[in-house]
Image: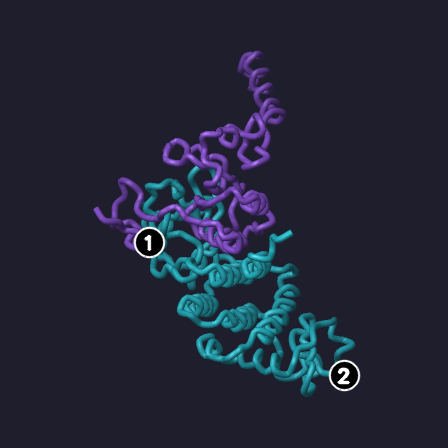
Chain colours: A cyan, B purple
Amino acid sequence: MDRDRLYRADAIVLRRRNIGDADSIFTLFAADRGRFDAVARGVRKARSKMRGHLEPLTRVRVLVAKGRSLDILTQAETLEAYRPLRDDLDLGAEALYCAELVDRFTVEANGQHDVFDSFTRVLDALATGAPRHVVRSFELALMALSGFDLQLGACAHCGGSLPGESILLSAPAGGFVCMGCRGQSGGGRLVSRRCAAVLRFARDAPIETFGQVQVDEALARELRAALADVIHHVLDREPSSAQFIDDVRRAPAQLSP
Amino acid sequence: MLRVPEHEAAELASAILDVKQKIRFCSICLNITESDPCSFCRDESRDAGLICVVEQPLDIIALDRAAAFKGRYHVLHGCLNPLEGLGPDQIHVRELLTRVKEGQVREVIMATNPSLEGEATAMYVQRLLSPLGVRVTRLARGLPSGADLEYIDDVTLARALEGRQDL
């Protein structure tokens, strides 16, 4: 095969869609290529050599042939399988949520080294036992790298100082809003002083450092709800895997009559 | 279609109509069938205390071909795939829960695909059924017959090692 038609990429598998009897289209995310789709022929057959290497949430080295409409995966080798994310339903749900965010926030054929770095670090953190609230740090990093950096130090509207307690986090305004600007903020969610402080730290600290912060259940819920509002506003929809996190958490009680 | 004889076109049209009119879901296991309940659920020689849960009706054909299972089936018609918007309400988990709650079931065998989504579905069902005290098992995962060891991915190899057996 013409070597110009081949390229190699270290990527993370974001999602898989089955087509035909035995083929699948994979969406991958690579540091130097951004998000890209490629088809793997015959990958669903038991004898396929690539099958196990292309599971979602696997970091792989792939060899891809450029195709007319869709590139073709010709080789795949696992670099990191993130096995703990496959063996724990709650961790897997969080990791899939991160994968969906990457899928929705990034664009095709555009190198995004910082996003790739953040994504691998949050997967590494989740897989090595970090608490699940590290995902908040990833959300903030991903938004900042995608041009939606939240203004958390001063009023996003006027630049003025913020109140000490019950601070309005306004997605339309792009951050915290002072008392005087609340009327023009376009709505939002009131967060506690503790939540505001943790959000600031989560944005500024490395994911691994934020993972060492003690966050109780109530604060974790508040942090998640606050950023869910912002992400919903930016994406104009709730990521479908966000609901899945709740579904698995409530599983035993969920389907009782 | 323009070149085929008229009677062949009529047969094809009739076959498509038959599919629409005669094929339905079994009210017990949700397999596709012409008669309700399906042949597997009617078969008294099959163990009603064992339920094998599969993603698709075609999986039943594959399992039955292996002739190693003599229990009943349950078809989920999909698996949990949050990125495609498939949650517990989009697959037939509720019907499985109802069957297990009726009390006759001793063991539920999760035969969903050994993919990330299939594993998530198996773990979810296990979590859902655990309060009912029913045994939930998973098909063994490991090396396929005729495979080359050098091409096997790390997760499959690790699980094959964990599931090793005395010779």
User: What residue is at 47 percent from the left and 54 percent from the top?
Assistant: B123
Q: How many marks?
A: 2
Give the alpha-carbon distance from disc 1 to disc 2, as whole Å. 60 Å
Apparent side of residue A189 relative to residue B26 in the rendered image (left or right): right
The image quadrant that residue B9 belongs to is top right
Front-lying residue, B90 or B82: B90
**Residue at the extreme left of the image, as rendered:** B167
Front-lying residue, A218 or A223: A218
* Residue A139, percent from left and from top: 54, 69
Few, some or many residues within 10 Å of mark 2 (<14, 14–19, 20+): few
* Residue A158, percent from left and from top: 71, 82
Instruction: Say which amino acid is labelled 1.
Output: Arg
Apparent side of residue B133 relative to residue A176 in the rendered image (left or right): left
* Residue B107, percent from left and from top: 45, 45
Q: Is residue A77 above or below residue B146?
A: below
**Residue at the extreme front of the image, as rendered:** B103
User: What residue is at 61 percent from the left and 27 percent from the top?
Assistant: B20
Q: Which mark is residue B159?
A: 1
* Residue B61, percent from left and from top: 44, 32
Q: Are discs 1 and 2 less than 8 Å apart at CB?
A: no
Quadrant in which the N terminus of chain A appears: top left
User: What residue is at 40 percent from the left and 69 percent from the top?
Assistant: A128
Q: Which residue is mark 2?
A: A180
Q: Is residue A33 visible?
A: no
Instruction: Say which amino acid is labelled 2.
Output: Gly
Q: Is residue B3 above or below residue A151?
A: above
Task: Specify the subunit that label 2 lies on.
Answer: A
Label 2: state its secondary structure.
Answer: helix
